[in-house]
Image: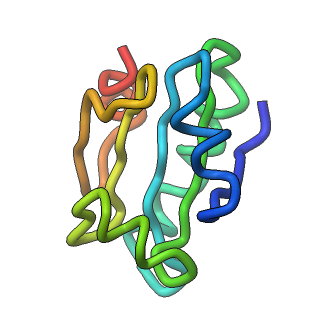
């Protein structure tokens, strides 16, 4: 499944109203660790049909980053039924990211 790029316009529909778990990668283009995690996040999106994988650029959507208390990036949030159930940040292995999803 392709990565969904989030904005305030599609966040509710794509994340909060999703019927499947959603992994959201809060990132920015200038962030080195975010660039490191990018290919790994894309890999997970391609391999896992049971979840939705989204990316949210914190520079384009600072209100959403603030709302979810994203203080440093990359930050990964897992949403189930519209609620944040897991969160972690920084450079992680693929196994660690998938461990957040369950």
The image shows residue 83, relative to residue 9, as above or below, that is: above
- Note whether 78 is above or below 90 in the view shown: above
Q: Is residue 28 above or below residue 44?
A: below
Q: Quadrant of residue 77?
A: top left
Q: Residue at x 25, y 32 (%)?
A: 86
Q: Pinpoint residue 37: horizontal percent, then vertical percent.
A: 47, 56
Q: Quadrant of residue 90?
A: bottom left
Q: Quadrant of the N terminus?
A: top right
Query: Is 99 on the left or on the right of 52, as rendered?
Result: left
Q: Is residue 97 left or right of residue 70?
A: right
Residue 42: image quadrant is top right
Q: Residue at x 30, y 55 (%)?
A: 91
Residue at the spot x=42%, y=34% of the render? 94
Reply above or below: 91 against 93. Answer: below
29 sits left or right of 64 in the view = right
Residue 29 percent across, percent down from the top left? 55, 81
Which residue is found at the position 22% from the left and 62% from the top? 69
* Total labels drawn: 0
| Residue 19 position within the rendered picture, expressed as x and y whole percent measured from the top left | 61, 16
Between 74 and 77, the one lying in front of the other is: 77
Quadrant that contains the C terminus: top left
Colour option used: rainbow
Residue nearest the viewer, comparing 65 with 45: 65
Query: Where residue 89 sits: x, y (%)?
Result: 25, 53
């Amino acid at each position: 499944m392709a990565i969904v790029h989030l904005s305030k316009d599609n966040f509710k529909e794509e994340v909060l109203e999703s019927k499947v778990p959603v992994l959201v990668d809060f990132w920015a283009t200038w962030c080195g660790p975010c660039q490191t995690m990018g290919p790994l996040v894309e890999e997970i999106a391609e391999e896992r049909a049971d979840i939705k994988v989204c990316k949210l650029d914190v520079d384009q959507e600072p209100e959403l980053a603030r709302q979810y208390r994203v203080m440093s990036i990359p930050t990964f949030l897992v949403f189930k039924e519209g609620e944040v159930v897991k969160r972690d940040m920084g450079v992680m292995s693929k196994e660690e990211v998938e461990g957040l999803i369950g």
